[in-house]
Amino acid sequence: MAQMLIEKPMNYAMHIGYPTEGYKELIERLENIKLNMKPEMHRIISVYETNEKIRRIIEGSIPKEGSYHRGSLVSIICGLDDKKSITLSALVELFYWATAWLDDIADENTLRQNTLSPRMSHGNTVALYISNTLYGIVFRVLYEEFKEDNKKLAELIKYFSTNFHLINRAQAIDVLLSKKKVEEVTIEEYMSLI
């Protein structure tokens, strides 16, 4: 996905001779955020999850390598200072992983980016609660580390809560629709999924 959003268009632009000076700074910022995001994710999990077993499950289920493009792009768009930018990036990625693990339960996936899904290592019930634990950590960190930025905090909570609602709503609709025969699904029902 990151290649689709940044790398491929940039390489093509440079290939055809399009001036890319402004993009070089963007790519450097994205790389800097990515470099600092993994340690920040670890810090957040270490500080906000006191149960060692739960901490190990969460950290062991996040792939060692990844594009981390979601957090990086959201961070740049929000325009926060470097420390808060890295924290926000890490939160976006952790939010993504909590959602991905729930999706793994519904879709019966075994791997995410060559890393064993928590449902495979600990079962669906534990994976469900691990996902919800991670959502709780994300919302707690949002409050505790951004509470001085009232307007920004409100925007961040709105972003996370809206996505939490829409993603899980769409997953529930998807599961309900999958129980019907294709010819029984109306266009309106299918569109409500999107």
Image (spheres, helix red, strand yellow):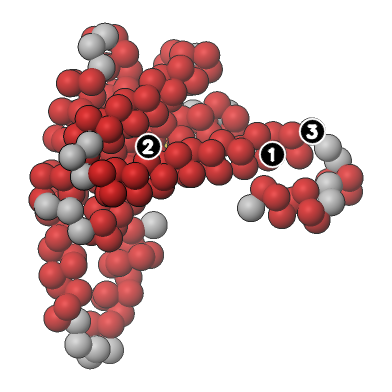
Crowd tier of the residue under label 2, counting other residues whose Cα lies within 10 Å: few below 14, some 14–19, many 20 or above: many
Which mark lies nearer to you, 3 or 1?
Answer: 1
Does label 3 or label 1 sit earlier along the sequence? Answer: 1
Label 2 secondary element: helix
Q: Residue 95 has which mark?
A: 2
Does label 3 or label 2 sit earlier along the sequence? Answer: 2
Residues under labels 3 and 2: Cα distance?
28 Å
- Residue at 45% across / 39% down in the picture? 161
Q: Do the residues labelled 1 and 2 touch (CB within 8 Å)?
A: no
Q: In the picture shown, does residue 106 fall above or below 77?
A: above
Q: Which quarter of the image is occupied by the N terminus? A: bottom left
Which mark lies nearer to you, 3 or 2?
Answer: 2
Residue 9: where, in percent of width, then height?
A: 33, 74
Q: Residue 8 has which mark?
A: none
Task: Work out whether residue 124 can be spotted.
Answer: yes
Q: What residue type is labelled 1?
A: Ile
Question: 149 or 80: nearer the eye?
Answer: 149
Q: From the viewer's perspective, is 43 left or right of 89?
A: left
Residue 87: where, in percent of width, then height?
A: 19, 41
Question: 49 or 79: nearer the eye?
Answer: 79
Residue at the right extreme?
184
Does label 1 or label 2 sit earlier along the sequence? Answer: 2
Q: Which amino acid does label 2 sit on?
A: Phe
Residues under labels 1 and 2: Cα distance?
20 Å
Q: Which residue is denoted by mark 1 in the rendering?
A: 173
Question: 41 or 120: nearer the eye?
Answer: 41
Q: Which residue is denoted by mark 3 in the rendering?
A: 179
Q: From the viewer's perspective, is 133 left or right of 175?
A: left
